[in-house]
Amino acid sequence: MLIGHRGPDTIRAMPADRGAAEAATDLAAGLMAGFPAPPDQQVNVSNWQQPRNVRWAFRHMREIIPTQLISAGTGSPCPLLATATELGNPVVLRVDGSPSTVEEILAGTFTDAVMVVHDGAVVDERYSEGMTETTRHLVMSVSKSIVGCVAGVLVAQGRLDPEAAVTDYVPEVAESGYRGTSVRDVLDMRTGVAFRETYTALDSEVRIMERSMGWAPALVDDPRGAYAYLATIGSEGPHGGAFTYRSADTDMLGWVCERAAGKRMADLISTLIWQPMGAEFDAEITCDPVGTAVHDGGISATLRDLARFAQMILNDGLVDGTHVTPPGWLADAFNPAPGVREAFAHTENEEMLPGGWYRNQFWFFRTEAGPILVCLGIHGQLIFVDRASHTVIVKLSSWPDAQNPDYLANTLRACRAIVAKLAA
């Protein structure tokens, strides 16, 4: 059975819950309803990231911020097969030690949609109120992993050298903190630029960059456009050292890719990733006031196509016998060079992702069965790839806050409980 035409009996609604799921629905009630909506119910560029607005906003980004189309083309989508395997409701031990279940974790972490694929077949696919199989949902920093795959294809084509200096492609940043850094450094977020990824601090560099790229109203002195901002970034240390999560590094990578290929990112994703992997639906990416894509977090896509992306990663870049991403690119990520693990080991991320590392815009952590690859975005976006059990899980969410360590830890535990059930 192909998923292309599934009925209500096979696409399940999210379980009702009087906790977080109801709270999320209540927060979004009445938003953008009316002709026009009342002023206090309108979502716009100044308020879309506020807790009550994120669920509506993440499904309507093109109505808030300009976007560029990532075309799926006219070919037939790669089929997602259904299976009779039952997921059930595995038990989960929460991070605080209390017992729970997968259903309770999903309901309690503002889940908008989730899909589980095992042995290449869909075990579970479900959507919350208002979201459907055709809804494009903002994936935030899961976008980074997609851009990283674009870089991998360009490397295989000989158009991008990961050991080259970023200034070989973008001389405009020669006087910034990116002077002397390599493409490899930005791929692995081991630059020495001065950039704080502190979402709660309005004066942090990530918030200044957001204003420059049009994700929030600009202040008088803000640079106009993401690339103009990147040219102003300072330095705080040597390149090639410890891993530090910096969204600016992905935007720098995106700029390098565009220069190397001579095409804008939306078209690169379309021709190098989205169409070759057999996407079913067009995606989109927000762009800044001068038409530059927001590489670090601007992609919106459907649940099904994100599952196809995850399955492609699980299969070492293969789709229908053809490599979308080069096999060596993912092999290098799963088995990184010396120093990559060490760059991660003593960071604050080690507790959440034990034994982990960051490579080619992917996160990893270790389990007894082997490494797990994850793509993560704020407000609860997740791709979970476990090669040992042949399982991928995609979860789209609308956490009211950008970061919530308990939500993430419990979600990862739920994913591992799902994997254990399917592997058994």
Image (tube, helix red, strand yellow):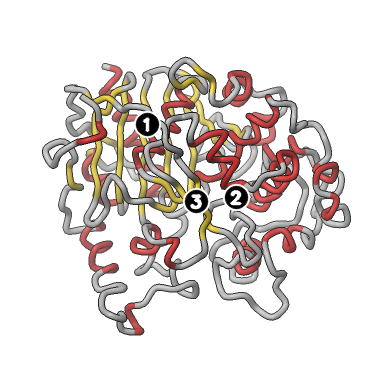
Residue 161 x %, y %: 77, 31
Q: Residue at x 81, y 55 (%)?
A: 235
At label 1, the amino acid type is: Pro
Residue at the spot x=85%, y=50% of the render?
171
> How far apart in space, not on screen, are marks 2 and 1 (Cα)?
25 Å
Q: How many residues crowd mark 2 within 10 Å: few (<14), some (14–19), many (20+)? A: many
Instruction: Name the outermost residue toward the front.
Output: 74
Mark 2 and mark 3 in contact (Cβ < 8 Å)? Answer: no
Pointer 1 or 3: first along the chain: 3
In the picture, which quadrant includes the C terminus?
Answer: top left
Picture layout, residue 152 above or below residue 97: above
Q: Which residue is outermost to the left?
A: 9
Query: Which part of the image, by quadrant, shows the N terminus?
Result: top left
Picture quadrant of residue 173: bottom right
Residue 246 image position (x, y, % from top left)? 65, 50
Measured Cα–Cα span from mark 3 to mark 2: 14 Å
Discs 2/1, front: 1
Judging by the rendered image, the residue that carries numbered circle 1 is 77
Categorize mark 3 by other alpha carbons within 10 Å: few (<14), some (14-19), many (20+).
Answer: some
For the residue marked with disc 2, what is the amino acid? His
- Residue 325 quadrant: top right
**Which residue bears the numbered disc 2?**
295
Residue 25 in percent (x, y) is at 24, 63
The numbered dot on residue 226 is none
Position in image of residue 343 (x %, y %): 69, 35
Mark 3, residue position: 69
User: Is residue 11 shown to the viewer in this render?
Assistant: yes
In this rendering, does residue 100 appear at all?
A: no
Q: Residues within 10 Å of mark 1 (few under 14, many from 20)?
A: some
Q: Is residue 197 left or right of residue 123?
A: right
Taking the spot 52% from the left edge, 23% from the top edge, the residue there is 317
- Which secondary structure lies at badge 2? loop
